[in-house]
Image: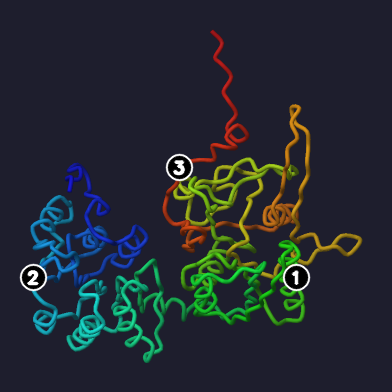
Amino acid sequence: MPLPPSHGEFDWTNVRGWLTEPEGNELSRLAKDKVVLEIGTFCGRSTLAMVKTARKVFCLDTFAGYAEPGMGNTLNEALCNFDRSEHRDKIVIIKGRQEDVLPTMDLSEIGLVFYDADHSEQSTARGIRLLEAAGLPETAAIAFHDYHDLDPGVVRAVDSWCIPRGKAPRVVDSLAVFDCEEQARQERAPSAYDVMLAIPTNGQTLVYGAAQGLFRATWRHHVQINHYDKSLLAACFNKLWCDGLNAAEKGDVTHVAFLHADIAPADGWIDTLIEEMERHEASLCSAVSPVKDPRGLTSTGIGEPGLAWSPLQRFATAEVMEFPETFDADAAGNPGKVLLLNSGCWVADLRDPRFFHVDQDGQAKVFFTINDRVVKTDGVWVHQVESEDWFFSRCLHEQGIRAVATRKVPIVHLGLTGFRNDVAWGTQECDEDLKPLWQPAKEPAIA
């Protein structure tokens, strides 16, 4: 394994291990200003993700390399990684088995436990019992790694513990998080809303992550699910949109949410979208969704007001990572432009009366349609299209309805593989295909 650079802060992503970047970022957030107990350290990847923000991290591990057959002792590699960190003085190593060490520890100051030990059901369940018996504070957050189908023992042990207690984890990749502070914040939040959750399909089956998104959409609000299947995409969307408008006019719902059958959102996505929408004083909030190809582009972008047939720019995931977590056209560096949104995962606040505006013929001013045309440009016939969600975005802009996009809801857009919105990836760092539109060539300097 090549040594990472020694100057500056040692980046935890250079350390061997299976912790993903979103998981590491979540652990870093959870660890802020807390004393952390890590059970299962391996080579220190997760340790270094947490110690950046934590007060102290206690690392409990046998360092016998069980996670990788034939690995052997990993203590020396972990020590080498820790010594390269500017936070080395906040790391305390405890070498031993959880059965021997936990009963001897004082856990009264622990604010976060990260559990990533033996992946068997028996060992995980034993670890949970040992933590409770050792007096882990009820206010402490717990995060279990490998909570996914590849490690069913971990899933069974965690579910057997949390379900009887009425708890449900917030899942980030394979990290199952139980955070009492977050739950308390939700309990102090404003009264619950009534949300119609619309699922448009055109003959396809819901992917597993989307089905999970239905039942883990919110911990706070009241949801009624509405599904409609039709091969005409815009007609399908408009039917569900009308259902939402009609239900709102009858007082049955306050919000409508859309989730596509190939979008797998993070748990509590409706809660997060509503929080971001209200924080930014908007009436619609959409999760950024990647296009399903290797370029790393998203279907969130910028358009010119009054110009329907071509976006100026589709944002690449690399650009989205540089924006604020939640942004409008101004925050994306395009004041006065149209923020073009994806309809795959969004929430609209139907208490905004502008959603119900009609023209003199009674036609709604906010709706979905797909516009197509064929034009001859420079002697060549060209097909142009305006997608239903970008048309909808232009309607919002024309009515003065404030809309924002966010990456605060991690999603995976599922195709031949999973395309995610919470890390920078892809072959393009910006929209190279449309670059002439949004970055005109500079005129040559006059000699």
Please tell me which residue lies in front, 357 or 159: 159
Q: How many residues crowd mark 2 within 10 Å: few (<14), some (14–19), many (20+)? A: some
**Which numbered disc, 1 or 3, marks the residue closer to the eye?**
3
Q: Residues within 10 Å of mark 1 (few under 14, many from 20)?
A: some
Residue at the top extreme of this rendering: 447
Q: Which residue is drawn at 56% across and 69% down?
A: 274
Instruction: From this view, report whether residue 357 is shown above or below residue 137.
Output: above
Of badges 3 and 2, nearer the viewer stands 3
The picture places residue 220, in percent across and down from the top left corner, at 52, 80
Residue type of the residue flagged with mark 3? Thr
At horizontal 76% and vertical 51% (from top left) the residue drawn is 371
Mark 3, secondary structure of its residue: loop
Label disc, if present, on residue 185 of the rendered structure:
none
| Residue at 37%, 90% in the rendered image | 165
Which residue bears the numbered disc 2? 95
Q: Mark 3 points at which residue?
A: 427
**Which residue carries the number 1 mark?**
239
Number of residue marks: 3
- Color scheme of the displayed model: rainbow
**In the drawing, does residue 46 fall left or right of residue 321?**
left
Q: Where does residue 234 sit, x and y in percent of width and height?
A: 73, 61
Residue 147: x %, y % from top left: 34, 74
